[in-house]
Amino acid sequence: MPYLVLFLAVAAETVGTTALQASQQFTRVGPSALVVVAYAISFFLLGWVLKFMPVGIAYAIWSGLGILLIALIGRLVFAQRLDAPALLGMAMILSGILVIHLFSQTAPH
């Protein structure tokens, strides 16, 4: 259950960050309001997850998956391209998340 809630927190954070881009520096009311609501939901859910897993593990997964999803949305929705070093760095982030999940005794399984 903590992983499901963590993934929901990541999804809310991803929605908030996408809305942040769409808000055009908070000049559009709808996307700006969505930023606030989505981030509030994300932090609330992340806070709940911290009852069940260490903050370092939860935050590593939350931020790492958020980075990957936002990069994908940036490419698909906003036509933002990443160069090879950026893609390599993101692959390393994904590798780190997998190592934590698969091998760490600190992460709940």
Image (cartoon, helix red, strand yellow):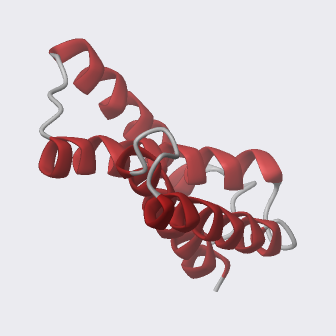
Which percent across, then down, holds residue 30? 46, 67
Foreground of the two, 107 or 67? 67
| Horizontal relation, residue 84 to residue 22: left or right | left
Q: Residue at x 68, y 49 (%)?
A: 59
Compared to 2, does 27 lie above or below?
above
Number of residue marks:
0
Compared to 99, does 82 lie above or below?
above
| Horizontal relation, residue 3 to residue 20: left or right | right
| Horizontal relation, residue 31 to residue 51: left or right | left
The C terminus, quarter of image? bottom right
Which percent across, then down, holds residue 81? 14, 28
Foreground of the two, 76 or 48? 76
Q: Residue at x 69, y 59 (%)?
A: 107
Foreground of the two, 101 or 74? 74
Q: Residue at x 25, y 51 (%)?
A: 73
Q: Residue at x 34, y 31 (%)?
A: 90
The extreme right residue here reads 51
Which percent across, then down, holds residue 66? 47, 50
Compared to 50, does 90 lie above or below?
above
Foreground of the two, 100 or 40? 40
Residue 56: quarter of image? top right
Residue 31: quarter of image? bottom left
The extreme top residue here reads 85
The N terminus, quarter of image? bottom right
Which percent across, then down, holds residue 17? 47, 51
